[in-house]
Amino acid sequence: MTILSTDTSCDETSVAVTRGNIIISNVLWSQASMHSEYGGVFPSLAKRAHEEHIDWVIAKAIKKAFPSSQSTISHLLTTKIDAIAVTVGPGLAIALEVGINKAKELAQTYNKPLVPVNHVEGHLLSVLAKPNTPKSAHHTPLTTHHTLLFPAFSLVASGKHTDLILVKGIGEYEIIAHTIDDALGEALDKAARMLGLGYPGGAILEKFAKKGDTKKYALPTPLAGQKERMEFSYSGLKTAFYRLTEKVKKGKALSKKQIYDLAAVFQDTAFRHVENVVVEALNKYPDTKSFFFGGGVSANTKLRKRLRKICRKKDVELLVPYSKTLCTDNAGMIGVVAGYKLKKGEFLSPKNVNKIDREPRAKINYPFLT
């Protein structure tokens, strides 16, 4: 089944064409520069930008998927696309609405089944996506209970989400640990903002941290000494970092060396907290076979290395997205999830598409179809 997927969960307008877990095309139009002056996503601006660009992104994704065809976009939607998928939640409500309305319109106009997808599940299964290469023609998608992968753990660190999820099989999830205040991605962005590195700042913070000394300053590791407490927490670390930054400034502008060191210390401390929770979880579930790492923070090479080291000690395979594009909010991962859902019959007929609506606070197991 060839699926056209849309994702407008936040500030990326994305459309993809997938087949199974093969990404045929995956187009993103980013609004990041538009929101930078606000230091975060401005909701009404995000909605308007999605509305202005979504038709263009759909057309580009289809053209990239079928580059040799001289047919119109409408004809390709009719003849080449078998189903429509869309992110229903979680995310920014008025942004989600744009993608959902467009997906409903496409499903009804072209008489295609509609697959509602959880955005967090998209990040979770993004590690199973494969590129569209000559070998793809002989690729067999994983079954929902692939014996070599499950049970697995998945760390999804994206936006307001930092969730450690036990994956018993595709579609069978249990949240083992989640953030009780700030998420990891939020904390990295806020630390970058304190250092004057702009928005979004997580990727910039990583670059600066590479040049810094992780031992230069001291910060408290969140929930240190509370191993049995399976939670993530970054609010206290953020406050401690603000106080440290002000102390280092002494009323003056920070030097580049100071910014490098502060970035390194904050990132190191934040990641040490992740390590503590992950190690405790793997100790509690010794039968774990693999570890999935998805979401925006999964693009961070330092954290990947630290998690890989833990996984090797536990004889667990670490899986990350094959491309950093798949770490961001994107429709490719939504199409991968939809492929599995179609096989299980989890979709709506064109006549019933209005049964779904945006679910901005949906958890990983939220039943979009009841």
Image (tube, rainbow, N blue to C red):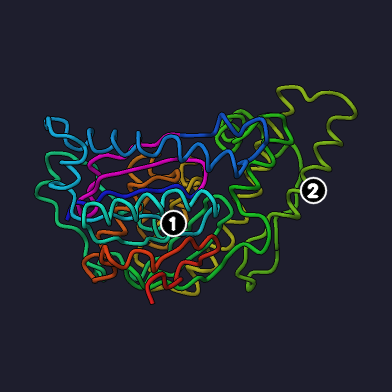
Magenta stretch encompasses residue 27: yes
Q: Measuring from the top left, give residue 218's x and y in whole percent.
A: 76, 45
- Please rate how many residues cluster around mark 2, counting C-alpha atoms within 10 Å: few if below 14, some from 14 to 19, many from 20: some
Which residue bears the numbered disc 2? 240
Residue 313 seen: no
- Number of marks present in the image shown: 2
Residue 227, position as x, y percentages in the image:
64, 69
Answer left or right for 333 relative to 210: left
**The magenta stretch spans residue 30:** no
Q: Amino acid at mark 2?
A: Ala
Q: Residue at x 38, y 60 (%)?
A: 117
Check disc 1 and report the residue beneath it.
Answer: 119
Q: What residue type is disc 1 on? A: His
Report the quarter where the N terminus lies. Answer: bottom left
Relative to 5, does residue 69 appear above or below in the rendering?
above
Q: Secondary structure at mark 1?
A: helix
Tell me the quadrant of the picture where the C terminus can be found. Answer: bottom left
Name which quarter of the figure residue 318 lies in: bottom left
Secondary structure of the residue carrying numbered label 2: helix
User: What are the residue bounds of the magenta stretch?
Assistant: 10-29
Q: Residue at x 87, y 24 (%)?
A: 252
